Amino acid sequence: METISILGSTGSIGRQTIEVAERLGLAITAISANSGAVLIEEQARRVKPRFAALYDEDAAGDLRIRLADTNVKVLSGAEGVIACAMEGDAVLSAISGFAGLRPAMAAIKRGARLALANKETLVSAGAIVMDAVSKYGAELIPVDSEHSAIFQCLQGRLHPPRGERREAAGGDYKILLTCSGGPFRGFTAEQLERVTVADALKNPNWSMGPKITVDSATLMNKGLEFIEAMRLFSVSPERVEVIVHAQSVIHSAVEFADGAVIAQLGVSDMRIPIQYALTYPERVPGLSKRLDLTEIGSLTFEKPDLETFRCLDLAIKCAERDYRAETCECLVLNAANETTVDAFLKEKRKFTEIPHIIENVLGRYSGVRGSSLDELTELDADVRRVTAECI
Ligand code: NDP
Ligand code: MG
């Protein structure tokens, strides 16, 4: 592995990926983002990629002027971002939301290593993505810390990951998906009523982009990760259990048929799973602090409160329905969530209204199906329109 392309380079994961790639001595041949021309200009001057792309055409025009004195080729629009996915031995996708789907598919279709942080891609189109991984012999390595942990716990079971995962994953194990509980762990429904955007943007253990930070507060993030785990490791929903573990030291665990449990532990630093996705199957010294268990002292575990944190419950139910009936309700859940969280961040809706709006939208798409990328893209757009009307 010598070269890498970073999709979503200006975000929380993207910026940390640049640090890791520099540390590993990888050449970053392409970077891309949505509209952040100032930051991507700075990154382009630092890493000297062949391509820098912005999805937003106007912002890309601005970037073209900013980088006129360099050799960096500036690309724009959806095609520009997809062209970046055609670069590099590995593609790290840290785009947020459904927008990451087509670039991820482009990387998979050329058989590249796809280090995937963008969980919404698997939630919305898991079957298509996993089938393409098999068909094109791509390597899909999870970056989400829990899924990286599960992947690490399954080493020796799932090898090689090149397209054989669905068959190899017999599903005779159970995934213990850990969850910090977010900033409102232990809150009552009444206390949640008073939560503000500023409160929701404070995460006790991780520093992340705004959308995933709100998802971590509603526990929708864990719901999306539940679906992500089911898709990535080909297990039924009964074989995924969410466990609240406030310290975020155990990043997840796997219980095997004989009752043995293997867990992966570490400090809360995304540079560890990012690096592992790039060096797999090797391990090399990284940038993060070491875990000091005696400093932590004790680890706690509890069941999630599904009644107060309705988003997690909604996600698990969608996962169950999609698993049994091959419907696309997880896509609906994701699109409704992205639209509603955006409205919450703009202070148009209250925190506690998020699950109500999503539930309402889900009710309108009960049993919905879709099998091609185009059908799913259309459905995603339709759900966003309907959700915006509900808001
Ligand atoms: P951020 O909001 O910090 O960054 C998102 C990035 O995606 C930005 O670079 C943004 O560009 C870019 N982007 C948005 N839309 C497009 C588009 N249409 N085309 C190209 N680029 C686009 O998010 P995070 O880094 O926190 O999260 C990224 C993904 O990783 C999410 O799916 C999240 O769930 C997942 N993840 C994140 C974790 C974390 O610790 N942050 C942990 C585990 C998973 P711009 O800056 O111009 O808007
Ligand atoms: Mg995670």
Image: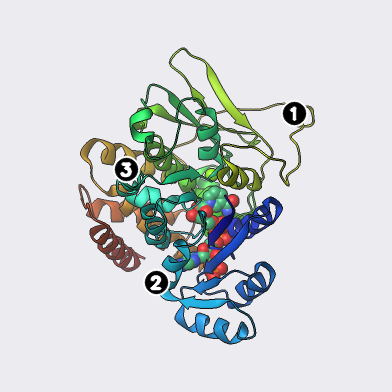
- Coloring scheme of the render? rainbow
Spatial CA distance of label 1 from label 3 is: 37 Å
Quarter location, residue 292? top right
- Considering the numbered disc 3 on the image, is that residue within a helix, a strand or a loop? helix
Q: Nearer the viewer, mark 1 or mark 2?
A: 2
Q: Does the numbered disc 3 mark a residue whose Cβ is under 8 Å from ligand 1?
A: no
- Considering the numbered disc 2 on the image, is that residue within a helix, a strand or a loop? helix
Amino acid identity at mark 1: Leu
Say if mark 1 contacts mark 3, CB within 8 Å.
Answer: no
Q: Within 10 angstroms of label 1, few (less than 14), some, or many (20 or more) residues?
A: few
The image position of residue 115, as x and y in percent, is 51, 49
Amino acid identity at mark 3: Cys
User: Among all residues in the image, which is located at the extreme right?
Assistant: 295
Quarter location, residue 296? top right
Say if mark 3 contacts mark 2, CB within 8 Å.
Answer: no
Q: Nearer the viewer, mark 3 or mark 2?
A: 2
From this viewpoint, is residue 201 visible?
no
The image position of residue 164, as x and y in percent, is 37, 35
Q: Does the numbered disc 2 mark a residue whose Cβ is under 8 Å from ligand 1?
A: no
Q: Does the numbered disc 1 mark a residue whose Cβ is under 8 Å from ligand 2?
A: no
Q: Within 10 angstroms of label 2, few (less than 14), some, or many (20 or more) residues?
A: some
Q: Which residue is mark 2?
A: 79
Q: Which residue is mark 3?
A: 318
Residue at image x 26%, y 64%? 378
| In-front residue for pair 154/230 | 154
In the picture provided, is 188 more to the left or to the right than 241? Answer: right
Q: Quadrant of the C terminus?
A: bottom left
Of the numbered discs 1 and 2, the one sitting upstream in the chain is 2
Of the numbered discs 3 and 2, the one sitting upstream in the chain is 2
Q: Which residue is mark 1?
A: 293
Q: Is residue 238 above or below residue 162?
A: above
